[in-house]
Image (spheres, grey):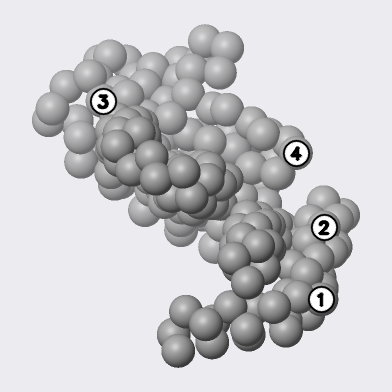
């Protein structure tokens, strides 16, 4: 029975690793199939990616528990929590625009700057305001069809401008209308295929899972 319990744990861990990834690709595919781009904060994007990757980091946990190595396990979890805390973007660190090309995002961003009365210049992928109190860096990730906007506020009194840029961009993105992208359809297919696999795994081991749950909860 103990060996069966270990097998059930391995199956559940595998399902727990694949399921968030499947949902992530499925949601991205649906977003990229929409007529309008989607704007979120950099912090929200980081939390979404972390939720997908977290089950992978938890994969060694059952092995530590089986070996009774609770000290190293707690130390590892503490280190992971500290790394997460220091990597978490600030609330005004920037934005990520999904379902958009770099050229269109650049055009809408310049319109947002003009709407706020901001003037500046571009140097490669970085825009800097004339009074040097704000800089915006564009980072395109074509695989997921998104553009990240990393914003550095160099003066504290310029911090409210980050919210203003988000509002201006959201207004302009709402007026964008485009055909569904082939990338969106491809991501939906990948998400569905990944979603089928954990369902198949659970169905294959359903009797073992039920027996293990019955044994644990009496």
Please give the residue where the numbered disc 3 appears in the rendered image. Answer: 153
Please give the residue where the numbered disc 1 appears in the rendered image. Answer: 204
SS class, disc 4: helix
User: Which x, y percent locates residue 26?
Assistant: 71, 64
Assign the C terminus to one quadrant of the image.
Answer: bottom left
- Disc with the residue nearer the chain's start (1 vs 2): 2
- Marks 2, 3: nearer the viewer: 2
SS class, disc 1: helix
Q: Residues within 10 Å of mark 1 (few under 14, many from 20)?
A: few
Q: Report the residue at 63% width, 72% height from top.
A: 1
Decide which of 77, 96 is in the foreground and name it. Answer: 77
Q: Is residue 107 visible?
A: no
Please give the residue where the numbered disc 4 appears in the rendered image. Answer: 143
- Disc with the residue nearer the chain's start (3 vs 4): 4
User: Compared to 48, does 149 lie above or below?
Assistant: above
Please give the residue where the numbered disc 2 appears in the rendered image. Answer: 190
């Amino acid at each position: 029975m103990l060996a069966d319990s270990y097998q059930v744990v391995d199956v559940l861990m595998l399902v727990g690793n694949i399921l968030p990834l499947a949902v992530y690709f499925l949601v991205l595919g649906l977003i990229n199939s929409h007529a309008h781009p989607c704007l979120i904060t950099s912090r929200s994007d980081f939390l979404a990616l972390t939720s997908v990757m977290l089950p992978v980091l938890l994969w060694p946990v059952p092995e530590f528990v089986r070996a009774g190595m609770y000290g190293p396990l707690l130390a590892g979890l503490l280190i992971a929590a500290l790394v997460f805390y220091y990597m978490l973007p600030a609330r005004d660190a920037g934005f990520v625009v999904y379902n958009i090309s770099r050229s269109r995002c650049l055009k809408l961003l310049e319109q947002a700057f003009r709407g706020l009365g901001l003037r500046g210049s571009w140097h490669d992928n970085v825009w800097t305001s004339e009074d040097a109190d704000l800089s915006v860096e564009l980072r395109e990730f074509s695989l997921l069809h998104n553009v990240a906007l990393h914003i550095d506020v160099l003066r504290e009194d310029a911090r409210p401008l980050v919210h203003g840029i988000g509002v201006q961009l959201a207004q302009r993105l709402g007026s964008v209308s485009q055909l569904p992208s082939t990338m969106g359809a491809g991501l939906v297919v990948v998400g569905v295929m990944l979603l089928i696999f954990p369902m198949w795994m659970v169905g294959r081991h359903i009797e073992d899972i039920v027996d293990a749950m019955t044994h644990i909860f009496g």
